[in-house]
């Protein structure tokens, strides 16, 4: 979830429309193409399932009731990219906006290529990762907007994948699809560890995802900043 880009356009113009059902998403394209119809169907299935997962897991891990995401948005170019506060979302990106409580993604620049190249669970991984940010916000357990929060979101996505497998939604090769998405979205070599836009190397991200598979959401919730004398990647504590 890289930071959105600054824009001089007025924030008022970016206010989201009324929230749709949490089991469907809003898209600006009125008539989906054959290419996007299958993608939209996958997004509907996985977004509903991720909501179901957190409806069960959030009370167990954090206490209290889980509050569904207010809105899901697809955008297609810089002109219809939504705003978060005073910033317009980037292309080829997905993002959770805490201020407006929505998850948005670039359909043609991110989700459709992932779907075509790696399949539906690559898309599910992106959604589960962004939901991880939303869950951390609801728990008021946000880590800084840098690599630590991103790896926690990867961990939550791994925890969700175990649920999806039990429900028959993680098909053979699904984990490989998630790894493909992480590899595609890895940090370039030399990215500073504490850069605001850092997500971690491919290895960092895969390790965090695997930690979630092995330890579940409770392990990911225990993710914390490493001590000053520790070294990256500062992954969640080892499951007992």
Image (cartoon, rainbow, N blue to C red):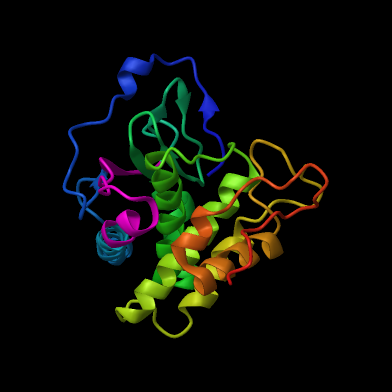
Question: In this rendering, would 95 be left or right of 65?
Answer: right
Instruction: Give the residue displayed 39% in from the left and 82% down from the top.
Output: 171
Quadrant where the C terminus sits is bottom right
Instruction: Give the residue displayed 45% in from the left and 33% down from the top.
Output: 78
Nearer to the camera, 126 or 229? 229
Residue 115 colored magenta?
no
Question: In this rendering, would 119 be left or right of 44?
Answer: right
Q: What stretch is highlighted in magenta?
A: 55-76
Q: Which residue lies furthest to the bottom in this view?
A: 172
The answer to which image quadrant residue 50 occupies is bottom left
Residue 36, percent from left and from top: 31, 60
Q: Is residue 28 visible?
A: no
Nearer to the camera, 35 or 145? 145
Figure disc tally: 0
Q: Note whether 121 is above or below 186 in the view shown.
A: below
Q: Note whether 35 is above or below 79 in the view shown.
A: below
Residue 3, percent from left and from top: 55, 35
Instruction: Give the residue displayed 26% in from the left and 41% down from the top.
Output: 71
Residue 223, percent from left and from top: 58, 53
Q: Is residue 42 visible?
A: yes
Residue 196, percent from left and from top: 65, 35
Residue 64 colored magenta?
yes
The answer to which image quadrant residue 84 occupies is top left
Nearer to the camera, 166 or 16? 166
Instruction: Give the residue displayed 44% in from the left and 85% down from the top.
Output: 172
Question: In this rendering, would 207 be left or right of 12?
Answer: right
């Amino acid at each position: 979830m890289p930071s959105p880009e600054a824009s001089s356009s007025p924030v008022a113009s970016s206010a989201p429309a009324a929230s749709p059902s949490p089991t469907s998403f809003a898209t600006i394209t009125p008539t989906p193409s054959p290419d996007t119809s299958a993608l939209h169907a996958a997004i509907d299935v996985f977004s509903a399932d991720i909501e179901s997962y957190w409806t069960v897991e959030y009370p167990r891990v954090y206490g209290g009731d889980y509050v569904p995401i207010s809105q899901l948005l697809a955008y297609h170019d810089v002109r219809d990219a939504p705003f978060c506060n005073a910033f317009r979302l980037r292309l080829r990106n997905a993002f959770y906006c805490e201020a407006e409580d929505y998850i948005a993604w670039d359909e043609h620049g991110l989700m459709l290529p992932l779907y075509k190249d790696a399949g539906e669970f690559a898309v599910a991984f992106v959604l589960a990762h962004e939901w991880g940010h939303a869950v951390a916000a609801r728990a008021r357990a946000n880590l800084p907007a840098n690599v630590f929060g991103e790896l926690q979101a990867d961990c939550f996505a791994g925890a969700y994948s175990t649920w999806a497998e039990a429900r028959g939604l993680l098909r053979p090769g699904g984990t490989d699809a998630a790894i493909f998405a992480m590899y595609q979205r890895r940090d370039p070599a030399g990215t500073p560890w504490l850069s605001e836009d850092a997500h971690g190397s491919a290895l960092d991200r895969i390790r965090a995802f695997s930690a979630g598979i092995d330890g579940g959401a409770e392990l990911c919730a225990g993710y914390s900043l490493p001590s000053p004398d520790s070294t990256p990647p500062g992954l969640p504590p080892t499951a007992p």
